Each structure stands twice: as C-alpha cells, then as structure tokens.
Amino acid sequence: MLYSALIFGLLGSFHCVGMCGPIAFLLPLDRKNKTNRILQLLSYHSGRILTYSVLGLLFGVIGKSLNLFGLQQQISIVIGVLMIVFILIPSNIFNRYNFSKPIYKLVSRVKTKMGKELKNKKKSTFFTIGYLNGLLPCGLVYMAIFGALATGSAYKGSLYMAIFGLGTVPLMTTAIYLSNFLTNKIKGRVLKVIPIFVIIIGLFFILRGLGLDIPYLSPSEMVTIEQVNAKYNCH
C-alpha cells in the first residue's frame, strides 16, 4: 500500500500549496546564489520529511502493537472506513465540534517559533522551519497517518510518511519559485479530485482487510513479521 502514500503526497501537495504556501513563500531564500537557494530548499523539505517520518514511526509502532493481537486486517478495514467517513462528513460538522481545539496551544507555539525562525538567515533555519511546518494540522497528513498506522510496522510506517513527504516536494518547490503558476480554476479542479482519490484508497484499505484471497490486493491472511519469526522459532 506504499503507493497510496505517493498518491496522497502528489495530490495533497495542491492542498499544501494553499495551506503551507504562505509559509514557503516567506522563506528567506538566497535569491542571488542558485546553489545556496537549492541547498536551502533541500534543507526545508528535509525538515518536513523528517517530521512526517517520525510521525509515521510513532503510528507504525502503535499499529505494530495492535497487530500482536491479530487485529491487522480489522485495522485495515477500520482505517479505510474512517478515510471515507472523514471525506463524506461535511466540514461544518467538524468545525462545530472543533476536534482540534485541545492542540491549539501547541499549534500556537509552533507558529510562534516558526515566525521567529522566518526572520533568521542561519543555515539551520530552513531545516527548523520545515520540521515545524510538518507539525501543523493538515487533513491530508492525517489521512497519510492512517495509512502509516495500517502498515503495522515502525519501519514501514516511517517509510510510508517519508514517501508522502517526497510526493509533496515537486509542486511545493515549483510553488516557491513560481508563486502564481497555478490558477484558481486549476486548483479548484484538483481539490475536487482529492476527495475521490481518498475514497478510492479507503476502499483499497477495506478490500485489503477483507482477505478475499486476491494476490497483493487482498491476501487471505496478512501475516506479520512477528508471526513468521514465531513460526520458525517453533521449529
């Protein structure tokens, strides 16, 4: 299911341009030296990808813990359902209940720290801004985290989120260089397509968990590494 991370990243980058674009446009890039500018951008993206990888590692560990109870297929189904539900439920309902309110203080601190870093021109500034940028709330990141959780592995969870981050790099980089290269019409069309792809990926997760004995897509039994090791240790 790692390919779904790349899809989230590529499509989600259109969302990222709208949400994180203002931050990226304010990066104190060296406009005179091309080499420095490229290194600064790489540092910024590396910071974001590291944050995503750490989040993937944490949720991959949680998924791994759940797998020890033989719940891997059930988790895949639940995550697929949640992806679809979050897309189908109107956003005004989420706004009414304000699920993110408990983390407002943390987000406020992240934004304050990021604001201070944007005024600096140290070499480490771009990495720090990228790292902090990855901590900001984002619906597409949440969807990717669901995918990392479903991997049931710390390594795969981290890799899943790293691939997601890499998928956002091309468009985010282009946006930084050419802030107005996307018209509102194009953005609007892409943003309409994103929910459709999220639903499709959610269906794939459900199909994966049902164990319909379809090779690679829906295996009859999702065997974990721990189960394989246990089998060989018994012998």
Image (cartoon, rainbow, N blue to C red):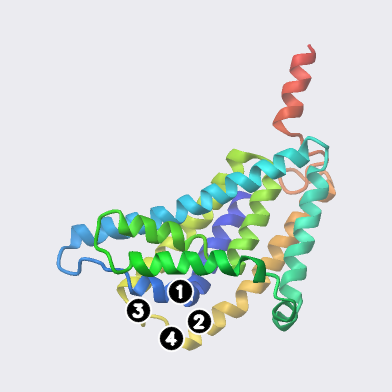
Q: Earlier in the sequence, mark 1 or mark 2?
A: 1
Is disc 2 placed on a helix, strand or loop?
helix
Residue designated by label 1: 17
For the residue marked with disc 3, what is the amino acid?
Ser
Residue projecting furthest to the bottom: 185
Q: Is residue 3 left or right of residue 115?
A: right
**At 38% across and 70% down in the image, what residue appears?**
115
State how many labels appear.
4
Q: CA distance from mark 1 to mark 4?
A: 12 Å
Q: CA distance from mark 1 to mark 2?
A: 9 Å
Label 1: how many Cα within 10 Å (few below 14, some 14–19, many 20+): many
Q: How far from the left and from the top, in percent, is residue 204? A: 73, 57
* Quarter of the view holding residue 147: bottom right
Disc assigned to residue 179: 3
Q: CA distance from mark 2 to mark 4?
A: 6 Å
Does the residue at mark 2 contact the one at mark 4 (Cβ under 8 Å)?
A: yes
Q: CA distance from mark 1 to mark 3?
A: 9 Å
Is disc 1 placed on a helix, strand or loop?
helix
Does the residue at mark 1 contact the one at mark 2 (Cβ under 8 Å)?
A: yes
For the residue marked with disc 4, what is the amino acid?
Thr
Q: Earlier in the sequence, mark 1 or mark 4?
A: 1
Label 4: how many Cα within 10 Å (few below 14, some 14–19, many 20+): few
Q: Is residue 143 left or right of residue 44?
A: right
Q: How far from the left and from the top, in percent, is residue 47? A: 41, 54
For the residue marked with disc 2, what is the amino acid?
Lys
Residue designated by label 2: 187
Disc assigned to residue 183: 4
**At 19% across and 57% down in the image, what residue appears?**
35
Q: Which-is-in-front pick, marks 4 and 3?
A: 3
